[in-house]
Amino acid sequence: MKIPAELKPAAWGAVGGAVALAIIGFSWGGWVTQGRSERDATARSNTAVIAALSPICVVRFQQQTNATEQLAELKKIGSWQQGDFIAKGGWATMPGSSSPDSDVARACAVALGLTKT
């Protein structure tokens, strides 16, 4: 196929413009790929679920009969083990679930660490 000489600069300009548009769009324009948008949506939904379930965990912890002693025990252990303490206590196991959610347990431990005894 023979392209007329007058069209070559316009064709190269269109190709260059498309490349520049893609670079600008993905760099500064806020364009994202499908995989990136799915990862972002998953992260946001996980954050929302944790934010919704951690107050339930806190209430379940505070409603037990020995809550004051358990809170003192929780504050004695290191921050790395506090989520495990909450999970083992069963307060991060939500109704309908068979196992505790470790992210909810960590958020619950953080929330309980901020409460006053």
Image: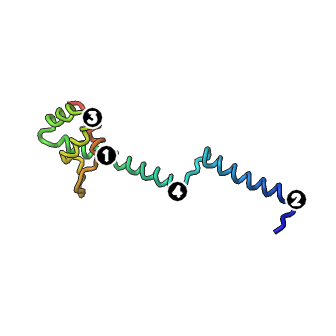
Q: Residue at x 24, y 50 (%)?
A: 100
Q: In which image quadrant can residue 80 be found?
A: top left
Q: Which mark is residue 79?
A: 3
Amino acid type, callout 1: Asp
Residue 10 image position (x, y, % from top left): 81, 56
Instruction: Point out the tag, 2 or 4, that comes first from the N-terminus.
Output: 2
x and y percent of residue 36 in the render? 50, 52
Name the residue type under label 2.
Glu
Dot in front, 2 or 4:
2
Total numbered labels placed on residues in the image: 4
Give the image's coloring scheme: rainbow
Label 2, label 4: how many angstroms apart (C-alpha)?
Answer: 39 Å
Q: Which mark is residue 103?
A: 1
Residue identifier under label 4: 34
What is the crowding at mark 3: few (fewer than 14 residues within 10 Å), some, or many (at least 20)? some
Image quarter in which the N terminus is found:
bottom right
Name the residue furthest left.
65
Q: To which residue does mark 2 refer?
A: 6
